[in-house]
Image (spheres, rainbow, N blue to C red):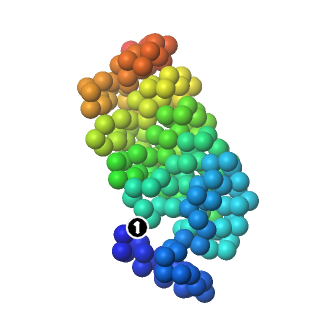
Amino acid sequence: MGLLSWFRARFLQRSRGLSFDDGLLQPVPRNEVVDAASVGNVDELRNVVAKYGAEFVRLEDDPVELTSLHWAAAAGNLDSVEYLLSDAVGSDPNAARDNDFTPLHSAAMNGHARVCERLIRAGTGINVQTDPQRYAALHSAAYGGHEEAIRVLLANGADPTLKNYRGECPADTARRQGNLAAAQLIESTASNG
């Protein structure tokens, strides 16, 4: 956590009348918020928001650590994703980490097509590439052979020609991983596009 984030956290704690030891910057341990987001414990997330504020649920203050939305997307927990994107919390669907890894990458790499759809509806950048690997969400879905997620991404404008650091388009990545059906799906959609 950077110095500015530390001061912001301290200000938010004090403005809510909270008093913590100097070493404690998050009133609810990060792992508890992550667990609640991952398993869909929306009631616990609501409790944290009511008691401490939405910023303690979003977990967007650290550019390296994954946000709650990343974890909910990775777990495929649509209830958590919906709540985190709601006005009550206001998580950023484009909250990229310092390597440009977004919640959409998390959902795609784990094959969670419905979560991919929801993030896309929320306005996430569908062709954002990570740094330095240059993986787009479509590469991530192709790597795992997640055909339903691939369909969703392609139907919503994912670019099947983007190259990663190896010079591979998503179909090449799928083929390298032995996911031939996924490679064919991407190629057939690209040629019919």
Badge 1 element: loop
Residue at the image position 41 percent from the left and 72 percent from the top: 5
Task: Identify the image quadrant of residue 28.
Answer: bottom right
Nearest the camera: 42 or 177? Answer: 177
Instruction: Locate the N terminus by quadrant.
Output: bottom left
- In the rendering, at what x and y percent does residue 3 appear? 36, 74
Residue 93 against residue 162 in the figure, above or below: below
Nearest the camera: 21 or 2? Answer: 21
Q: Is residue 138 left or right of residue 90?
A: left
Nearest the camera: 186 or 63? Answer: 63
- In the rendering, at what x and y percent does residue 90 appear? 55, 61
Residue that sits furthest to the right in the current view? 43
Q: Which residue is mark 1?
A: 1
Residue 121 against residue 144 in the figure, above or below: below
Residue at the image position 44 percent from the left and 15 percent from the top: 178
Indicate the amino acid at tag 1: Met
Residue at the image position 49 percent from the left and 13 percent from the top: 181
